[in-house]
């Protein structure tokens, strides 16, 4: 994927700053380059929508920004912190400030919707009392239209309902940056509109 650089406010500190990032999978004859000299600057409060063909590297770039993959080549700054060359502990601290909504949901099958959402709060350094965490999770699930399904496990939810649990989990800890990989793909029009309004 070749990203386009958007830099309408060059003097403002960027929330995300991608400079010459390249990424590949495999090695030797199996090596496949998916990112080529990507540059991207996202200002605080800005919404960026990436489009492109399947396999063009959109998810790879999101997972690099979201600290789920290591930077191979180039420089990548998130909330002012360089991801290239950062230690695992530095990356873990930064990860708590991000929200990620996965295309494949990535819910824990043995946990209820509420417990899956609460996982995002349990990873925070400054934990809230359990009753407050549960209240926030319930409110977030109600906001995505799942108030009556908070005690259901993923096996009892439809694909769209699982996606809404993933959305609630990505938002419940009020992240400074939200990264979403096709967050409304499995949703009907009304549910998709609710999710976009929440964003």
Image: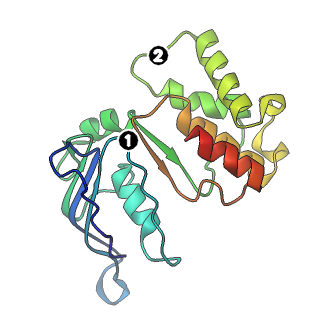
Q: Provide residue 195's location: percent of width, then percent of height.
A: 64, 44
**As rendered, which of 189 and 24 lies closer to the eye?**
189
Relative horizontal placement of residue 124, taking residue 39 as reference (left or right): right
Q: Earlier in the sequence, mark 1 or mark 2?
A: 1
Look at the picture and state if 178 lies above or below 150: below
Local SS, label 2: loop
Work out which residue is located at the far front of the displayed protein and give it.
8
Residue at image position (59%, 36%) is: 169
Q: Provide residue 47's location: percent of width, then percent of height.
A: 43, 50
Q: Mark 2, residues whose alpha carbon is within 10 Å: few (<14), some, or many (≥20)?
A: few
Where residue 137 sits, quadrant-wise, is top right
Relative horizontal placement of residue 106, taking residue 33 as reference (left or right): right
Residue indicated by mark 2 = 127
Closer mark to the observer between disc 1 and disc 2 = 1
| Mark 1 vs 2: CB contact within 8 A | no
Q: Provide residue 144's location: percent of width, then percent of height.
A: 70, 37
Residue 7: tell me if it is visible.
yes
Q: Mark 1, residues whose alpha carbon is within 10 Å: few (<14), some, or many (≥20)?
A: few
Relative horizontal placement of residue 51, taking residue 157 as reference (left or right): left
Q: Specify the quadrant that holds the N terminus.
A: bottom left
**As rendered, which of 197 and 116 lies closer to the eye?**
197
What label sits on residue 175 in the rendered view?
A: none
Work out which residue is located at the far bottom of the displayed protein and give it.
29
Residue indicated by mark 1 = 45
Residue at image position (75%, 55%) is: 189
Residue at image position (39%, 35%) is: 176
Q: Specify the quadrant that holds the C terminus.
A: top right
Local SS, label 1: loop
Coloured how?
rainbow
In space, the residues marked 1 and 2 are separated at their CA atoms by 26 Å
Look at the picture and state if 105 lies above or below 22: above
Residue 108: tell me if it is visible.
no
């Amino acid at each position: 994927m070749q990203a386009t650089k958007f830099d309408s406010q060059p003097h403002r500190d960027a929330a995300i700053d991608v400079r010459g990032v390249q990424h590949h999978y495999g090695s030797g004859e199996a090596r496949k380059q998916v990112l080529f000299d990507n540059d991207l600057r996202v200002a605080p409060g800005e919404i960026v929508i990436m489009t492109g063909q399947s396999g063009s590297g959109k998810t790879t770039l999101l997972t690099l920004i979201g600290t789920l993959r290591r930077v191979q080549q180039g420089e990548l700054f998130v909330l002012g912190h360089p991801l290239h060359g950062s230690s695992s502990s530095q990356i873990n601290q930064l990860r708590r400030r991000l929200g990620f909504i996965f295309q494949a949901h990535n819910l824990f099958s043995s946990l209820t919707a509420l417990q899956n959402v609460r996982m995002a709060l349990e990873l925070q350094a400054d934990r809230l009392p359990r009753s407050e965490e549960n209240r926030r999770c319930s409110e977030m699930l109600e906001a995505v239209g799942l108030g009556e399904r908070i005690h259901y496990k993923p096996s009892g939810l439809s694909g769209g309902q699982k996606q809404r649990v993933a959305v609630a989990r990505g938002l419940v800890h009020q992240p400074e940056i939200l990264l979403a990989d096709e967050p409304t793909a499995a949703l009907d029009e009304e549910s998709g509109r609710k999710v976009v309004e929440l964003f």
